[in-house]
Amino acid sequence: MVQVTHLSKSYQLRPVLQDLSFSIETGQRIALVGPSGCGKTTLLNCLGGIDRGERGSIEIQGFKLEELSSEELTKMRREHIGTIFQFFHLLPTLTVFENVEFPLQLLGIAEATRTKRVMELLERVSLLHQAKALPTQLSGGEMQRVAIARAIVHRPSLVLADEPTGNLDSVNGGKVLDLLAELSNENHITLLMVTHSHEAARICDRIFEMCDGVIIEKKDNR
């Protein structure tokens, strides 16, 4: 699913990623751990096509990101990648239904198909009763469940999660993690999750530990 080869990235001459190489198999869940500033979010941004490496290669689902134009990269990201953020990043003027529907609108999917898929997914994340609510009317746990639904509604191959439970209490964080594990299993989604939480890492198959822009350890978590 993911093949990273000799990836390097610097900001203002400061190395952030240094000659990274690793692969992730289809359906695997990977926890990316390490101290703040070690390059985890930069790596996530490069994998998501938001940022580009200076050297090396990233291949996702057969697409070499460095060979794609900006338009091709946007299309690949919309079709194949879902993203979950620590602070939810829901659109505040859209309802729960409209937030989840938005990725399908960008892909030009027919309205009837959009409605069916969104309603089924909202039921799956136990938020069908909140379909018409605005984000400000939701709890933190509910907002993160909406964000998860939005990240997978277009049926991506890869989901990138940046501290998805970092803004939640332990109870809601645990529920969100269980839901993320269940949905990734059901939909055969590959997951790469940046986290400081040992609790979050428990749902992952492998743990990659980063330090100073280098992956210093890869270990199985099962």
Image (cartoon, helix red, strand yellow):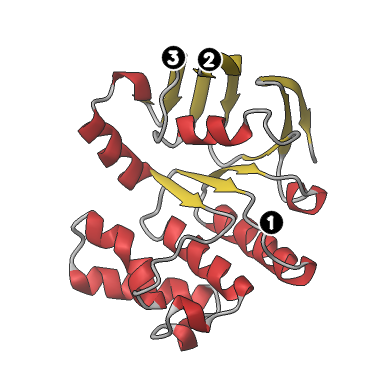
Q: Is residue 160 above or below residue 164?
A: above
Q: Is residue 179 visible?
A: yes
Residue at image coords 62%, 44%: 193
Q: CA distance from mark 3 to mark 2?
A: 6 Å
Callout 2, which amino acid? Answer: Ser
Q: CA distance from mark 1 to mark 3?
A: 30 Å
Could you tell which of marks 3 and 2 lies nearer the N-terminus?
Answer: 2
The label on residue 141 is: none
> Dot 2 surroundings within 10 Å: few (below 14), some, or many (20 or more)?
many
Where in the figure is residue 63, as x and y percent of width and height?
35, 26
Q: Which mark is residue 166?
A: 1
- Whether residue 119 is visible here, answered yes or no, is no
Quadrant hosting residue 125? bottom right
Residue 87 on image: x %, y %: 56, 59
- Mark 3 falls on what kind of element? loop
Residue at label 2?
8
Q: Amino acid at mark 3?
A: Glu
Of residues 18 and 79, the one drawn nearer to the viewer in this rendering: 18
Mark 3–mark 2 CB contact (< 8 Å): yes
Does residue 142 appear left or right of residue 79 in this picture?
right
Rendered image quadrant of residue 141? bottom right
Residue 135 is situated, as x and y percent measured from the top left of the image, at 47, 76
**Where, quadrant-wise, is the C terminus in this rendering?**
top right
How many numbered marks are there? 3
Read off the residue under disc 3: 54
- Considering the numbered disc 2 on the image, is that residue within a helix, a strand or a loop? strand
In the rendered view, would you say 118 is above or below 1?
below
Kind of residue at disc 1: Gly
Say whether residue 80 is left or right of residue 56: left
